[in-house]
Image (cartoon, grey):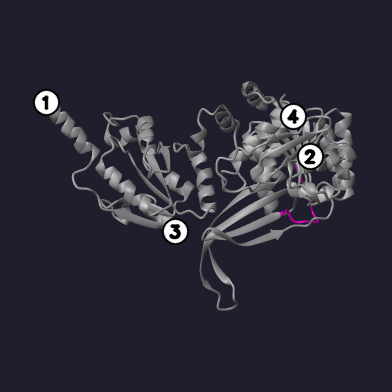
Amino acid sequence: MVSSSNFDHYLDNLAHTRLLCLGDIMLDCFIYGRVERISPEAPVPVFHMNHKTMSVGGAGNVVRNLSALGVETSFCGMIGRDNEGEELKKLIDELPKTTGCLIQDLHRPTTHKIRYLAHNQQVLRADNEATFPLSVELQDQVIQYFQTQLSLVNGVIFSDYGKGMLPPTLLKELISLANQAGKPVIVDPKGSDYSIYRGATVLTPNLKELAQATRMPVSKDDQIVEAALNLINKYDINAVLVTRSEQGMSLIRANQEPFHIPTHAIEVFDVSGAGDTVIAAFSAALLGGASFEEAAYLANVAAGLVVAKVGTATVSSEEIRNLMKKKDISFIKNKNLNLSEANDIVIQWKRQGMKVGFTNGCFDLLHPGHIALLREAKSKCDKLIVGLNSNASIQRLKGPQRPIQSQEARAMVLASLEMVDMVVIFEEDTPINLIHTLRPDVLVKGADYTVDKVVGAHEVQSWGGEVILVELIPEQSTTRTVHKIKEAQKV
């Protein structure tokens, strides 16, 4: 039923697809730290903050996924008049190919979720939100924006998190307007009353949501089909795409054979935001020309990739292309990354509670001293990053005759070592920019340095990290090796 021959075409089409997304946006904040004692004031842990990351959550994560896939997106969400709202504006503005219309409600805070993590586990989650419906005046603003965008897009996504952005009366009117314009409507639903989604093209509930909406059993394939058909017939829905966690997905349409797809997950780290990835990939593929089955298959592949990451992650069309072609299934473990890619992975590692180490150098003509340094560095952390001087950087430091090996060759050799988890090439004379961005927990250098001379030592120590100096193997260096080769050529 699904042929892989057309997927390159559909993935290419993503760049020419335009979607309109409306829904509940929220700011996800992750604060990392450590807990070492109980407070003397009350029987609660004392949390020592280290650093924090912020990202767009809720419907905003759907938009992040669309942006990562290269889809042009118009987005409408709701914020309050506060710092969190301003941060969301900034984050949305930074997304490629994304235009945001964030409606400001003066009577509510921006939905804001703060997660405190220590020692590989969540210590506390604090939510700040109000879930009452938008006022009539603000609903009119949404309708006006919706009408101006509708003729410009291929279809509409509603990402309903039940925070008040999509009250039933508004949602019904928007779906009606989309139907009149002939625009497909894909909905990630919430709650138990699916009458508010009447006339939608596709609903994408998970198993729990499907059971809640239909009050029917959903533990077996035939039960899922029966429950989905109940929604289709009752609410004039074209299709229901049920996400089933480790069991994959099921696509059900009236008068069509059910399409059950096994999971494509390579390795499951975190299912957070997987539903957002599904609706983004499915919608983009369907509106880019794929069939329902092909779009569901592509969305399943995307979901399998995203759960192999940590936190509310995204996947790119190139990642999907590589996996679907099976040319490079191990690409998810690819170790040679640019700084932006590396930062995304490091955030995932830290959310998983891993200690991240960093060392750097030229690593030109790898020798036993290099191996000893890397092995010792790896023993001090869970994941080891190697900052690698570029060709130009080495020439400035060591002269025009170096490096002996190109930066690509050196990176490939380093990446082949089991103790190295990531290689990032830097163009500057020092790796200070890498260290500032990646914020390693452990910084490792050879003992020919003193701590005060190690680039980045002060910074790493300032956020609670550790600087380690490793004893070197005597008479092992690339310069010495090059000299020996030149001497041998004279004989």
Secondary structure of the residue carrying tag 1 is helix
Marks 4, 3: nearer the viewer: 4
Residue that numbered label 2 is attached to = 225
Instruction: Give the vertical position of 254 relative to 373 (above or below).
Output: above
Q: Is residue 106 magenta?
A: yes
Q: Position of residue 474 (x, y in %)?
A: 19, 47
Residue type (three-letter) at the residue carrying disc 3: Ser
Real-space CA distance between mark 3 and mark 1, rounded to the nearest whole angstrom: 51 Å
Where is residue 97 shown, x and y percent of the image? 66, 32
Above or below, 463 against 159 in this view is below
Give the residue at mark 1: 490
Q: Quadrant of residue 299?
A: top right
Q: Is residue 122 left or right of residue 441?
A: right
Instruction: Tell me the tag on residue 31.
Output: none
Q: Gap in Å between the C-alphas at discs 4 and 1?
A: 70 Å
User: Would you call the spot at circle 2 few (<14 residues within 10 Å), some (14-19), or many (20 or more)?
Assistant: many
Q: Which circle marks residue 292 in the picture?
A: 4
Is residue 222 found left or right of 63 in the rendered image?
right
Residue occupying image coordinates x 24% and y 49%:
472
Q: Quadrant of residue 234?
A: top right
Q: Is residue 90 visible?
A: no
Q: CA distance from mark 1 to mark 2?
A: 79 Å
Would you say residue 200 is visible in this rendering?
A: yes
The kind of residue on which mark 4 rests is: Phe
In this rendering, the label closer to the viewer, 1 or 2: 2
